[in-house]
């Protein structure tokens, strides 16, 4: 048996490799092993989730950010970024529209905008949850204090997405300005988990200075942290950032890593991201076929979509929400899977808590 086949077999049965083995698996990859991995990932995903693909309605609530991540188009120092902030009424209207369209999970995402204090965010979350009692709310608003995460949880937030970006501290320091700290990122993630959120981490594939060894650390971190959700998508340069001339990540490596992550955590909620659909028109379908089981169509008001520009040429910025959903439905159907409209909770969390709130 070839060495990479051996590693895939081990991963499939033990859901774990050593860091050097993860590096080796990435380094040795070729078309044949990628095909084998994809086949194993699709099988294991189907054994847990059948043919169901979950949808989450993404509402991009603010393009203001106090941070200065070197890769991100809405970083503080990008004077060309167009800034906007949705009002509470606008956010609630997006959720209402999404509910009508069949969404049962709303993801509120934004830059680290100091306007969104706990009081403001808690009010929005609790209003969505009161009105749409069968829905889940996910927040993705960056690093906050443990007390803040606790208040947001108490207000009804079910899930929180905070990509770790890289599990290698030195690599982290190359992607972020001096004032941002790897240790704090990791502390936020452990706080979220301890509080009881369905927690999501993740990273960009092909970010500057990433190597097989930093990726191996990411995979080991995912294996030990055991997130309920894991967001990975290719890095795509934004022309107004320090990384504007860097090379983008590839579809090939993103798909390979999606399959690896599915084998590490069979029940993880794994999105086929918008970034993947941006570097390849069929990227999201390919993501599904490689082991992903979540898609996140955009529910933001059409007028602001172009302004939430994390990277160049982002897709779905000209469409209305209903159009976007229809388009994705068609795309998923072609893969042989089907979109479902339930909350799509983490199976692990349902088992653990009998589903905290409805
Ligand atoms: N502020 C929140 C946070 O930090 O988690 C949410 C918004 S942040 C812009 C969401 C994610 O976008 C980041 O975690 C990062 O991985 C991704 N992202 C930012 N710039 C990107 C780029 N140039 N290419 C691909 N993904 C990018
Ligand atoms: Fe948004 Fe296709 S998914 S337009």
Image (tube, rainbow, N blue to C red):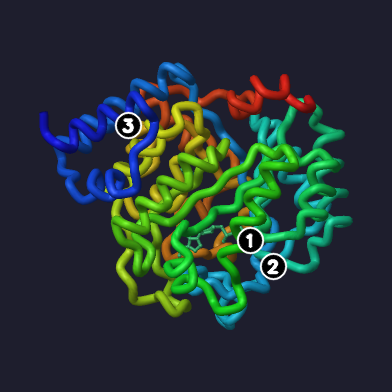
Residue 174 locus on image (x, y percent): 44, 73
Identify the image quadrant of residue 137.
top right
Camera-side residue of 12 and 119: 12
Residue pictured at 53% horizontal, 38% vertical: 226
Residue pictured at 81% horizontal, 36% vertical: 129
Whether label 2 touches label 1, CB < 8 Å: yes
Lower position in the chain sequence, tag 2 or tag 3: 3
Residue 340 locus on image (x, y percent): 55, 23
Q: Which residue is identified by label 1?
A: 304
Q: Residues within 10 Å of mark 2 (few under 14, many from 20)?
A: some
Identify the image quadrant of residue 141.
bottom right
Residue pictured at 39% horizontal, 75% vertical: 244
Identify the image quadrant of residue 336.
top left
Above-or-below relation of 352 to 254: above
Residue 123 visible in rendering: yes
Residue 84: assigned label = 2
Residue pictured at 50% horizontal, 27% vertical: 267
Q: Which residue is identified by label 3?
A: 11
């Amino acid at each position: 048996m070839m060495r990479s086949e051996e590693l895939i077999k081990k991963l499939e049965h033990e859901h774990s490799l050593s860091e050097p083995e993860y590096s080796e698996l990435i380094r040795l990859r070729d078309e044949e092993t990628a095909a084998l991995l994809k086949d194993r990932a699709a099988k294991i995903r189907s054994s847990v989730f059948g043919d169901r693909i979950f949808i989450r309605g993404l509402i991009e609530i603010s393009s203001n950010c106090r941070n200065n991540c070197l890769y991100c188009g809405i970083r503080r120092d990008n004077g060309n970024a167009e800034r906007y902030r949705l009002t509470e009424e606008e956010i609630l209207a997006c959720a209402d529209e999404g509910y009508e369209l069949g969404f049962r999970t709303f993801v509120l995402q934004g830059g680290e905008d100091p306007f969104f204090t706990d009081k403001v965010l808690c009010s929005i979350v609790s209003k969505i949850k009161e009105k749409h009692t069968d829905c889940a709310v996910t927040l993705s608003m960056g690093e906050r204090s443990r007390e803040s995460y606790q208040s947001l949880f108490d207000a009804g937030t079910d899930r929180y997405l905070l990509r770790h970006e890289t599990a290698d501290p030195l690599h982290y320091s190359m992607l972020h300005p001096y004032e941002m700290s790897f240790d704090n990122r990791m502390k936020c993630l452990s706080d979220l988990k301890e509080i009881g959120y369905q927690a999501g981490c993740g990273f960009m594939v092909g970010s500057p200075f990433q190597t097989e060894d930093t990726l191996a650390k990411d995979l080991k971190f995912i294996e030990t942290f055991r997130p309920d959700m894991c967001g990975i998508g290719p890095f795509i340069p934004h022309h107004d950032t320090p990384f504007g001339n860097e090379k983008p990540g590839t579809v090939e490596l993103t798909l390979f890593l999606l399959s690896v992550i599915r084998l590490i955590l069979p029940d993880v909620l794994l999105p086929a991201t918008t970034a993947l659909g941006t570097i390849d028109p069929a990227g999201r379908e390919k993501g599904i076929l490689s082991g992903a089981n979540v898609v996140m169509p955009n529910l933001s008001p059409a007028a602001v979509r172009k302004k939430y520009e994390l990277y160049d040429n982002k897709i779905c910025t000209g469409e209305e929400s209903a159009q976007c959903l229809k388009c994705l439905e068609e795309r998923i159907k072609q893969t042989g899977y089907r979109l479902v409209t339930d909350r799509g909770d983490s199976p692990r969390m349902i088992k653990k808590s009998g589903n905290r709130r409805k």
